[in-house]
Image (cartoon, rainbow, N blue to C red):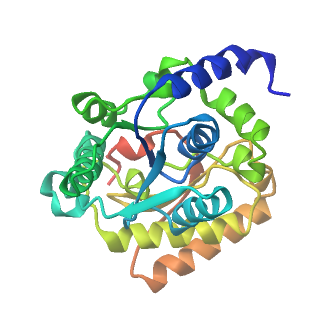
Amino acid sequence: MIESAAQSGYTRLSELLVARQGVLRIALSGGIDSLTLMTLAAEIRAWPTIAMHAVSPAVPAEATERCRELASRFNWSLVELNADEFSNPQYVSNPVNRCYYCKSSLFDRIIEGVTAGCDDIGTLATGTNADDLGDYRPGLQAASERNVWQPYVEANINKAAIRCLARELNLGALAELPAQPCLSSRVATGIAIDARDLRFIHQVEKAVAASTEAGDIRCRVTDTGIVVQLPAGSSGLVDSDKRADIAILVQKMCAQHNRRFKGIEPYRMGSAFLRDCND
């Protein structure tokens, strides 16, 4: 049974989804929030619900595979598109509000693609949840400017409630999936976004994840080199030998790609926005 703390929000969310008439297009990132929303909406709505997923260097391949796997399992209509954010110099320059330009490109691509085919856009929705409103998220402005719907926010559902809902919907390991912001969020503000950097970031995070049980793993690109961040309370950090092994692993990867390894630090949410002034 879904936990009582989430029950009222779950009921409200269901009512909102059922009441929303016409086609509903949900932007899927491949994370728990949007995939859980898509699963519920497709299950309970009488109107068509279509999944929209952007394939990009900033999106880990595993996220795309999750979208495809669930679309196949639940027989969703899945549309994959190129958000083309790398053609926007404002995005590539990586200002502090980079996410605004990324989301603007994504939403515009979805809207333009649908209307070009003479289809009704209907409602475009995202998996933004109530917790997100407390963070610095420039992408929310892009959503607001385009009237993108945020049903979790309207139902006052946070991340913990979404995990409860994912378990109720029998989504298995997805319910425990760590937060997975786009790979560009690992690049410090002002350092240009480069697809090669994003591929390297992903390679490092996968390699480190394979060697530790730590949940939130981040490979950061800073002015002074590559930094790997791991949760301070992770069992993978208790063992100093394991920490040393990870450092050796990442050092080798950096050497192979002509990069400087700066070291391992405790995970800090949003720290990619911080410029390293200790040159």
Report the residue that reaches farthest toward the left: 89
Give the percent coordinates (x, y) of residue 264: 58, 57
Report the residue that reaches farthest toward the right: 1
Position of residue 111 relative to residue 143, above or below, is below
Position of residue 122 relative to residue 194, above or below, is above
Position of residue 144 relative to residue 122, above or below, is above
Quadrant of the image containing the C terminus: bottom left
Q: Say which of 34 and 88 sits in front.
A: 34
Horizontal placement of 145 versus 272: left or right? Answer: left
Seen at 73% across and 45% down, the residue is 176
Q: Is residue 251 visible?
A: yes
Give the percent coordinates (x, y) of residue 230: 63, 51
Give the percent coordinates (x, y) of residue 244: 70, 66
Report the residue that reaches farthest toward the front: 46
Q: Is residue 260 visible?
A: no
Seen at 73% across and 68% down, the residue is 211
Give the percent coordinates (x, y) of residue 32: 61, 45
Position of residue 136 relative to residue 180, above or below, is above
